[in-house]
Amino acid sequence: MHDELELLRAANPVPAGEGPWRDRPLDARAERALNRLLHSRRTRRAGRRLVLRAEAAVLALVAVLAFTFSDAGSGPAVAAPVALAPRAGTPAVSLDVLARRAAARARAAGAADGPRRGSHLQSWYLSLESGPDAAPPVTVPEERITRWNADGSGSEMVVATDPRHPGRPVIHDDDGHWRTVSDGKVLHHETYPAGSEARHSGLSARTAPPTDPAALRDHLAQLYGGAGGIRTTPQLLEALSAFRQEWTPGPRETAAIVRLLAEADGLRPAGAVTDRLGRRGQAYVHDGSGGPHGSGGAAKGTRQMVILDPGTGELLGLEVTFTEAQPDFRIKAGEVMSYEAWMP
């Protein structure tokens, strides 16, 4: 607790004389941002472990950070991704239809087609400053690969890269200081001998996910849902994001995931889309409506888009965009807050 308080004091996340937070308690968005701040600091101290908890999931709005920038002036390096737009006139596949396709694939899967510990992730995260002298938002692109083997050996790697701009410099977060680094620079690489997994991964990374939808929901709630579990669709998407950073699901787990999404409230089909890695997918969106503090709803003025493979139901990506302008952070409606692209 002492370390966390010191981190908060050092970050000065809510200056007394600044912005709409003066003399007010933190709202749900700010609280999630502080959760990410605390977790991100602990992650750096632990050597940039790739296993991210739900507090650091894609939906965390880093609206209260005030990082110091250093050598980050390259235009291409900080350019935010353009929001993905479903193709007009393309037929939308319902989640129920896609769930049936995924279930058929699961029935045909063999014994060796189970889930794999570890993940392969390309991510873009927007970091924001507030106040009259705030710097423009900065997008941090990284590729993360985690692998664990049956004997407990494994490897972790983080690479600074943006596949939208091959060869161009990108931004790297160096312990709270932004720096420009070359595309493809390895930021972290470590290998672990046999028997290491128990010391370098959490319980969730060592607990295989169930293949029954109801059991999977309970599993996600217990290990990735936070203190309140999973009560809403935004919480389900956050939990799936955190789960996907620790596991690569097989056909049976994928079928259970798609069935959970088909039963989720407020998640509607938006049509065909090409994701940031050039893959064909089907998009499903959920609009945030705010809600009481701690209600688990997505922030008002944001939209979540989950992208699934139209043939298999595999999770391809999750995007969060602003549907309303955020003048305090120099954000325009339609800009991307974060994006994750998951790979085999």
Image (spheres, rainbow, N blue to C red):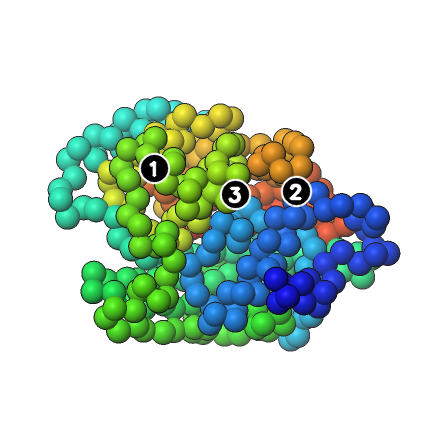
Residue 27 picture quarter: top right
Residue 39, horizontal then vertical, whole percent:
55, 59
Residue 257 picture quarter: top left
Looking at marks 3 and 2 on the same chain, the residue that comes earlier in the sequence is marked by: 2
Residue 333, horizontal then vertical, whole percent:
67, 41
Q: Is residue 244 left or right of residue 84?
A: left
Q: Residue at x 35, y 24 (%)?
A: 96
Residue 234 lies, with reference to residue 335, above or below; the image says above
User: How many residues crowd mark 2 within 10 Å: few (<14), some (14–19), many (20+)?
Assistant: many
At numbered mark 2, what does the secondary structure look like: helix, strand or loop? helix
The residue nearer to you, when weighing 243 against 134, is 243
Q: Is residue 201 left or right of residue 329?
A: left
Residue at which label 2 appears: 28
User: How many residues crowd mark 3 within 10 Å: few (<14), some (14–19), many (20+)?
Assistant: few
Residue at which label 1 appears: 216
Residue 82, horizontal then vertical, whole percent:
56, 48
Residue type highlighted by circle 3: Ala
Q: Residue at x 58, y 55 (%)?
A: 36
Residue 206 picture quarter: bottom left
Residue at which label 3 appears: 227
User: How many residues crowd mark 1 within 10 Å: few (<14), some (14–19), many (20+)?
Assistant: some
State yes or no: discs 1 and 3 in contact (Cβ < 8 Å).
no
Looking at marks 1 and 2 on the same chain, the residue that comes earlier in the sequence is marked by: 2
Could one spot residue 182 in this view of the protein?
yes
